[in-house]
Image: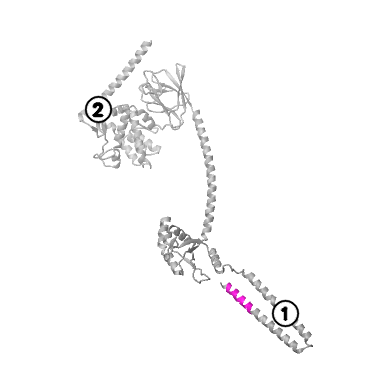
Amino acid sequence: MRDYSLQFFLYAQMEKNAQFQADLQKYEEQADFLFRKQRLERIEQFTDQFEFLANEFPCNVYFEGLVYNSVYAAFQAARTQEQEMRQRIQQSQSIQEVYQIAQHIDDPPDWSTNRVEVMEKLLRDKFRRNKDLREHLRATNNYKLINTYKNPTTSNLYWGEIDNKGQNKLGRLLEQIRSDINAYEDIDKWIISAFPLETEYHPTITLTTYKENENLGKVELKNQAYYFIGQYNKNYLVLQHPTISRRHAAIFINESSQTFVIDLGSSGGTFVNDQFIEPHQPIMLANDDKIRFAKSTRSYQININHDECYSKLKDKIDLLKNDIERLKNISTINQKKDDKNKKKVKLEEDNFHEYDTIKVKQLPERVSNLELIEMINKCTDKFQKWQDRTNGGNKERGHKQYRFHIKDLKIPLDRQTGNTKNIAFIIFQYAGQAQGLFKFYKDNRKEFFLRDKQLEFEICDQKSVEQYIENLRWGDDKPEPPQQQIQVQQQEIKVPKIEVKKEEKRGRKQKSSDSDSNSSSSSSSSSSSSSSSSRDRSKRKRKDRKQSKKHKKNKKR
């Protein structure tokens, strides 16, 4: 019995290899015959025997859940996201009908960058899904594939060539797919491109093997996005039954963590729950589903476990929550700092708006107001250019931005010499102009010269100007406030008046007492006392007049 099964296995394997070699030799002989006959070094037109290379060639092509009649139809459907429009393209019976529908589709915004990726996905599906076309492409060997057109449009120049000009994107993609087919790498790249796969969290898939209701053990599939099944020794699950192909089927996890099985065009077929599945058509799996391959009597019961994925996701969520809390704390701290800085800046700005005066130092001797004003006006053009550089030339503020409006100009005098001080105060009508001129001065100090002397600017307010002038006027002999001075003067005036009345009373008493004794002595004493009192009164009056005049002058000043 064992010898018979071994002989059957060897016979089936030899028959399979012989058929494959015969088909391959047939395709190569056909291609070599055509190449020798036409003496081709490259294929320039996708017509006649090379029509299968054209996108309009009728064949099944899968794209996002629908199977279309050609690569051209699937490519036009990829330009829209409307499911109704895609179904209309799928149900169309000719290329002309697809072309008419495609006229009403606008290219998506990112189409210019994504169209090559979409075309490669569709071409890989075309030659993976259709075995004959794949073998025809393999038979072209290393000949250069050039897609030539006659109409000089931008699309034709992009996908092909016209009079040896163009990018020939379609021919280059076909050459790349042909090299992958020869290197047996086309299946991997087809699965990755045709079906978006899970890249991070892969569930553990357990296959429980049964043969005639007997449990033969378990196989675990884990830590990968897809798994090949077949006789090839590099498959994840190697099966030795003679009716199973080298790359028979594949199990993969899509980006939504759903598990699918797909038949890779095997000769024996694949069955899910004893139902045959179409080649290259993905079927979603659930727990307790059973898979069987070709004529093998073994079945594999599916169990999909996401616990490990959940634990990884939970750990990642916890880390993200911690990061969010940390960022919130940082943001609250930064917000408090920003609020403090904003309050500080606002306070500085509010205070800065009161500074409408420029204090000019290091003035030359005996400078006039006109000289200083002319020097400021000369800086207007340079100030305007500086404003254009720093603020981008914003002219919405009108003439206030580039014309200085001087409200007053004060140059204090020296009390001792009578000459002007080397300091001046320029009071502007608008506070912004004083601030702008001061900023301009800080960046362009060399522009402010008067009589070959470098000037120095400071910004201040009018209160400090008044205080400076007042201190300069009085020095250390600053008078007392007016109300106190008046009270002192009144006290000084009242005291002598009271003394005068007392002296008059004493004089009258002396007159009455001494009138009888001696008339001559009384008259002389009364005349002397009256003359002395009149002199005192006149002195006091003169002193009062001088003080009142002095007080009035102080008030005027």
Q: Is residue 405 above or below residue 70?
A: below
Q: Which residues are magenta?
A: 542-554
Q: Position of residue 332 (x, y in %)?
A: 54, 45
Residue at numbered disc 2: 31
Q: Position of residue 98 (x, y in %)?
A: 33, 37
Q: Is residue 548 magenta?
A: yes
Q: Main secondary structure of the magenta part?
A: helix
Q: Position of residue 103 (x, y in %)?
A: 33, 41
Q: Secondary structure at mark 2?
A: helix
Quarter of the figure that contains the N terminus? top left
Answer with left or right where residue 336 lies relative to residue 265: right
Residue 60 appears in the figure:
no
Answer with left or right where residue 167 lies relative to residue 345: left
Of residue 404 and residue 287, the one placed in the foreground of this image is 404
Of residue 361 and residue 62, the one placed in the foreground of this image is 361
Quarter-of-image position of residue 143: top left
First in sequence: mark 2 vs mark 1 = 2
Q: Is residue 116 magenta?
A: no
Numbered badge on residue 501: 1
Query: Residue flagged by tag 2: what amino acid is it?
Result: Ala
